[in-house]
Image (cartoon, helix red, strand yellow):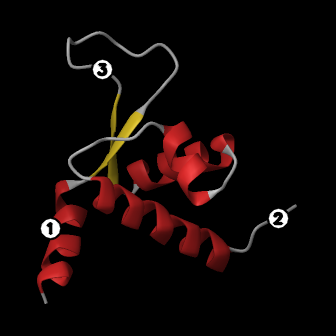
Amino acid sequence: MRISQEKKDKITEQILSYLFSTFPNYPFTAEIAKEIARDEEFVKKLMLELEKNELVSSIKKNTQGDIFSRRIRWRLSNKVYEIYHARQNN
């Protein structure tokens, strides 16, 4: 089943909004997928596209510096966070 670009954009908006609302926590892909009720692989694909467009950043290491073997945490890029934060204050 194909999803239109318009629907992908709306799902992307949901993801970005969720990342902003969970700041300063950085959720895993599975947590994001559960929150927006979407398939993990689909969410991962969207997250990688967002990372390529510099809207989000991936975190592949834990707080001790060990690399996650299969999981990725996500956070908003600084640029996107500032935009969301500015709109929140207006």
Q: Which residue is mark 3?
A: 61
> Would you say the residues marked 2 and 1 are in contact, meaning their CB atoms lie under 8 Å apart?
no
Mark seen at residue 41: none
Q: Give whichever of 30, 76 is nearer the camera.
A: 30
Question: Where does the image place residue 18, in percent across and percent down from the top left?
Answer: 40, 60
40 versus 15 height, above or below: above
Q: Quadrant of the C terminus?
A: bottom left
Q: Earlier in the sequence, mark 2 or mark 1?
A: 2
Relative placement, left or right, of 42 versus 62 is right
Which SS class for mark 1?
helix
Which residue does the image show at 70% across and 47% down from the upper left?
39
Taking the image as drawn, is residue 9 in sight?
Answer: yes
Q: Quadrant of the N terminus?
A: bottom right
Question: Where does the image place residue 69, in percent across and percent down from the top left?
Answer: 47, 13
Q: Residues within 10 Å of mark 1 (few under 14, many from 20)?
A: few
Which residue does the image show at 49% across and 67% down from the upper left?
14
Q: Earlier in the sequence, mark 3 or mark 1?
A: 3
Question: Where does the image place residue 45, in percent across and percent down from the top left?
Answer: 60, 46
Q: Which residue is mark 1?
A: 82
- Quote the CA–CA distance across marks 2 and 1: 33 Å
Q: Which residue is mark 2?
A: 2
25 versus 19 height, above or below: above
Residue 41 appears in which quarter of the rendering? top right
Q: Earlier in the sequence, mark 3 or mark 2?
A: 2
- Quote the CA–CA distance across marks 3 and 2: 33 Å
Q: Amino acid at mark 1?
A: Glu
Between marks 3 and 2 in the image, the one whose residue lies nearer the viewer: 3
Q: Amino acid at mark 2?
A: Arg
> Would you say the residues marked 3 and 1 are in contact, meaning their CB atoms lie under 8 Å apart?
no
